[in-house]
Image (tube, helix red, strand yellow):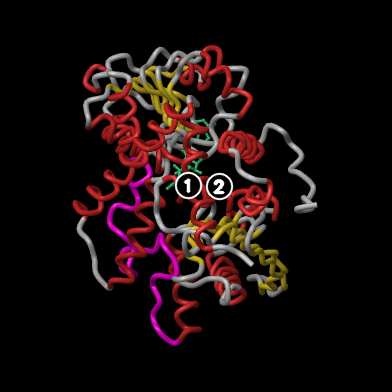
């Protein structure tokens, strides 16, 4: 037997199971051997630690933290740290693999990793969060490293937590090592352009897709689900490029204006309105699910996973879907969408602008130099456009949708690199 598999993730329709189904399909098309299949599938390293933390009330609570390096074949591993009550090792393993394919598809020299701690950041004080983050960093001192494994923020963590990680790691090494983590505050060596990078990559992918479909951006319409970091920046940048964004949404509801929404105005409204679009006056409220089936050229799901399913896919009218979120389309919707001839720019490509600028942050830290925004945008736009073209070309070559083509590009790159590097 080549490998004894752990028990599978139970829910068949979850985004991680969807990812595996697409991975398996791409592997089959590439004709990869069973040995290589398991080399690509089984994580290189996984570490679980118990973290006893003194809480503000004086009691000690023990948290479980994980770090999984799925692959370090292309280079040091890269991936976020998630603080969420639902964190478990199966999920972290799958998310780490996702990072491997995302980095490979945009051709940046990183493997994939993910970390997580089962905790509820909404119920923790800043002091408790700080002690937890520092304890986790110390527990992972021989895992993390600018040449080994470079963490970043994910759900429940942000620049503040990354600053603590960098500080704790630097203290342990006796020198400042800012390249050990990305997503840091600007003053600690964070990169310009990181905040809007994912939304910007979504915009670049959308324009590249429109070009293939011969859609003039100045005559195009778009609907964007989610108005957070990814959705709001994607909407603003599409608007800037002449696309008429007719619908936006967030957790408070969906808002439609056939004449186009002033996105800068919507962002200003959100920021003055406790971070939500509730009662947004410059558009008409519509049912949240209706946003997904509007008659628009471009649909950008940028909120959460599994929003496009076999149930609503038959009603989607958009000519292309650009996946800002991770896993917004469940595998059961793939065939329906493909049969309808909708061009899907898949998540591992469309939202890779964020990890690309994280890579630039690491490069700048290692150079001890700071790039200006113009350089960052030009370089990340080029990387996104080249990755789009490569995936599009592969989809034609293999006669498969761009989603499977993205996995083919990524898997082939990692498999070829492994073959050159060799094993035991
Ligand atoms: P965020 O928390 O900044 O924003 C999420 C937005 O979605 C908010 O506006 C929220 O109100 C809205 N939302 C939540 N549930 C909704 C629902 N049911 N209907 C409509 N809107 C809803 O998060 P983000 O950083 O923008 O991430 C969004 C997605 O993009 C996630 O899937 C994330 O994993 C993915 N992603 C983010 C980045 C990044 O750099 N931030 C990179 C890659 C992928």
Front in this rendered view, residue 400 or 88: 400
Q: Residue at x 40, y 12 (%)?
A: 295
Looking at the rendered structure, the secondary structure element under dot 2 is helix
Picture disc at residue 102: 1
Looking at the rendered structure, the secondary structure element under dot 1 is helix
Give coordinates of residue 318: x percent, y percent: 42, 17
Give coordinates of residue 204: x percent, y percent: 30, 36
- Ligand 1 is within 8 Å of the C-beta of the residue at disc 1: no
Q: Which residue is mark 2?
A: 98
Q: Examine the rendered structure and indicate whether residue 392 appears above or below residue 156.
A: above
Task: Tell me, yes or no, if residue 249 can be seen here.
Answer: no
| First to last magenta residue range | 174-200
Q: Is residue 196 magenta?
A: yes
* Quadrant in the rendering for residue 31: top right
- In this rendering, would 346 be left or right of 358? right
Q: Examine the rendered structure and indicate whether residue 403 appears above or below residue 50.
A: above
Q: Residue at x 39, y 54 (%)?
A: 108
Give coordinates of residue 26: x percent, y percent: 57, 36
């Amino acid at each position: 037997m080549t490998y004894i598999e752990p028990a599978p993730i139970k829910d068949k329709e979850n985004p991680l199971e969807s990812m595996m189904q697409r991975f398996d399909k791409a592997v089959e098309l590439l004709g990869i051997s069973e040995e290589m299949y398991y080399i690509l599938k089984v994580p290189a390293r996984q570490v679980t630690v118990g973290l006893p933390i003194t809480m503000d009330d004086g009691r000690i609570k023990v948290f479980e933290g994980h770090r999984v390096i799925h692959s370090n074949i292309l280079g040091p591993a890269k991936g976020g740290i998630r603080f969420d009550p639902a964190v478990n090792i199966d999920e972290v393993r799958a998310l780490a693999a996702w990072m491997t394919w995302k980095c490979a598809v945009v051709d940046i020299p990183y493997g994939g990793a993910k970390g997580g701690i089962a905790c509820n950041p909404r119920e923790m004080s800043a002091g408790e969060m700080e002690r937890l983050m520092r304890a986790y960093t110390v527990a992972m001192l021989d895992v993390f490293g600018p040449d080994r494994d470079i963490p970043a923020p994910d759900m429940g963590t942000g620049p503040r937590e990354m600053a603590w990680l960098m500080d704790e790691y630097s203290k342990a090494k006796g020198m400042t090592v800012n390249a050990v983590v990305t997503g840091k505050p600007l003053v600690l060596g964070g990169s310009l352009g990181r905040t809007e990078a994912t939304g910007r990559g979504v915009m670049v992918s959308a324009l590249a897709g429109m070009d293939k479909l011969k859609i003039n951006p100045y005559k195009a319409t778009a609907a964007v689900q989610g108005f957070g970091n990814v959705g709001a920046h994607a909407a603003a940048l599409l608007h800037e490029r002449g696309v008429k964004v007719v619908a936006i949404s967030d957790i408070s509801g969906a808002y439609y204006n056939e004449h186009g929404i002033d996105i800068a105005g919507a962002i200003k409204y959100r920021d003055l309105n406790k971070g939500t679009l509730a009662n947004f006056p410059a558009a008409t409220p519509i049912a949240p699910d209706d946003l997904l089936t509007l008659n628009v050229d471009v649909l950008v799901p940028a909120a959460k996973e599994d929003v496009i399913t076999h149930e609503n896919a038959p009603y989607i009218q958009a000519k292309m879907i650009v996946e800002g979120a991770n896993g917004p389309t469940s595998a059961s919707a793939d065939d329906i969408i493909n049969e309808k001839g909708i061009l899907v720019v898949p998540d591992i490509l469309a939202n890779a602008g964020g990890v690309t600028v994280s890579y630039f942050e690491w490069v700048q830290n290692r150079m001890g130099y700071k790039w200006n925004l113009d350089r960052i945008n030009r370089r990340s736009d080029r990387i996104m456009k080249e990755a789009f073209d490569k995936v599009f070309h592969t989809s034609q070559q293999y006669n498969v949708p761009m989603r499977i083509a993205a996995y083919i590009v990524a898997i082939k790159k990692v498999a070829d690199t492994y073959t050159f590097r060799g094993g035991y």
